[in-house]
Amino acid sequence: MRILFATAEVDPFSKVGGLADVAASLPRRLMEMGHDVRIVAPRHRASMEAHAASTTHRAYTVAVPGHPRDIDVGVAEGYGGVPVYLVADSHYFGEREVYGEPDDLLRYQFFCRAIIEMLKQDDWVPDILHLNDWHTAPLAFALRNLAWANPKLRGVASVFTIHNLRYRGPDELNDFLSQAIYYSDVVTTVSPSYAREILTRDYGEGLEPLLQLRGDTLIGILNGVNYDIFNPRTDALIAHQYDLSTLEVRLRNRAVLRRQLSLPETDGPLLGMVTRLTEQKGVDLVLQAMPEILSARAQLVVLGDGDKWLKDELTRVQAEYPGNVHLAARHDAGLAQRIYAGVDMFLMPSRYEPCGLGQIIAMRYGAVPIGRRTGGLGDTILDADDNPEGGTGFLFDEFSSFGLVSALDRATRVFRDPEAWLRVQTNGMSRDYSWRASATHYVEAYTAALRARGIVPRE
């Protein structure tokens, strides 16, 4: 099957959030399964060097209102040898941020127009155009509309993945996400529970009636994690490597992390968060629960940036309790790995969580997740009280500081029982949340999309 994966960001060429991880890892796994996969992404500032180093370039002229623009598409090699088309335009994607520019709407519409031009001109035509979030959502309608006049496009089916329903684009008049939900042949989202939740008023962001129309063509597929990158046995970013057979070595990483962050040694648990500082991630709940966290003799490490008021509050708490709280208000891949490898518990008290990768990475590294039972958190964390032998973490239902504190209390009791704690850690590290199973489900979604268009899938 020929698959073109369209995305605003892809690791290692540009990375802001989890989409970059998905865009790098899912195509790699699909290629390993024997599919012909390519990725197309803008050439952002971080990928200028890779674009310049490319030995394969193609020129296109993109029709835009006003006058056409010439672009240069360089082919780079992504993870696993997957070809990555980097679309270069000095005006829209030069020395600028991936997101958050005043003309984001125009920039990503231009990116979509560039992809259409590539589809029209290239000899290689995909069977599946896999779209991701609002940045590439206009292509779902474009495929349907332009196929009337272009036979090459009639054999292309679209699959649209919603990574977070709340992010629908910067335009006040147009909702491209809704268009893609309506026009795509299959719609997926990033966990089975989130696929069910967004059909309700509480989580549907006003789009639940439209989503309900999709019926069984709305599919929830868990995101996976690249186990070659996130592997405590080989991770060069952590001080001491370990695996299930040498889990006792992990305690050395906790000591290193405490020293690095000037936190004293204590007999209480070390808690960690690697997150955007937003209310969606439940950072406000953690602030409300600080008295109970402190009374449990726990320490808290938070890595991430975001809303100013949350950052200010965490800074204030850190100043008041420097031996218990450390805020690193930045993006730092190395420190993130050291947190996963060093903390005892990993907090994800989210209001909603489409999938979440933090809890999966935490379990991979032997950190026990504490999360709210929503979206992918409920799909991946097995509560240790509900599953005494197979539990991998602790869940709570009510979005409140009481709910979080209750789960933290249960986790702390188990933490003080070394044998029981080791069992929870071992269970989490033994779970397989690689892309192996999820990629197979995506192939099934691609097949369904082709059949919806009356196209016989390639073997």
Image (cartoon, grey):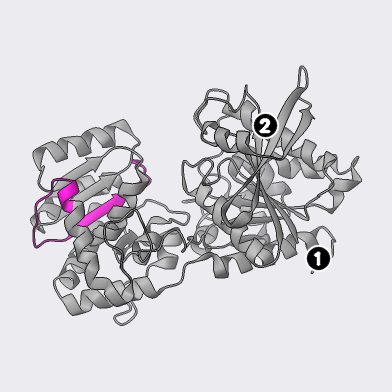
Q: Does 54 sit above or below residue 21?
A: above
Residue 346 appears left or right of 381: left
Q: Which residues are magenta?
A: 258-280
Front tag of 2 and 1: 1
Q: Position of residue 243 (x, y in %)?
A: 33, 71
Q: Residues within 10 Å of mark 2 (few under 14, many from 20)?
A: some
User: Disc 2 to disc 1, how far (Cα)?
Assistant: 31 Å
Compare residues 201 and 4 and report the one nearer the observer. 4
Tell me if I can see residue 173 in this picture: no
Name the residue that disc number 2 marks: 109
Name the residue that disc number 1 marks: 458
Compare residues 402 and 261 and report the one nearer the observer. 261
Q: Kindly identify the residue that appears in the image at 26 percent across and 35 percent down.
A: 311
Residue 48 appears left or right of 300: right
Circle 2 SS class: helix
**What's under tag 1, amino acid-wise?**
Arg
Q: Residues within 10 Å of mark 1 (few under 14, many from 20)?
A: few
The residue positioned farthest toward the bottom in the image shown: 389
Q: Which mark is residue 436?
A: none
Q: Quadrant of the C terminus?
A: bottom right
Mark positioned earlier in the residue sequence (2 or 1): 2
Q: Kindly identify the residue that appears in the image at 29 percent across and 72 percent down.
A: 425
Compare residues 250 and 383 and report the one nearer the observer. 250
Q: Kindly identify the residue that appears in the image at 51 percent across and 33 percent down.
A: 99
Q: Does 399 sit above or below residue 57?
A: below
Membership of 125 in magenta stretch: no
Q: Position of residue 70 (x, y in %)?
A: 75, 25
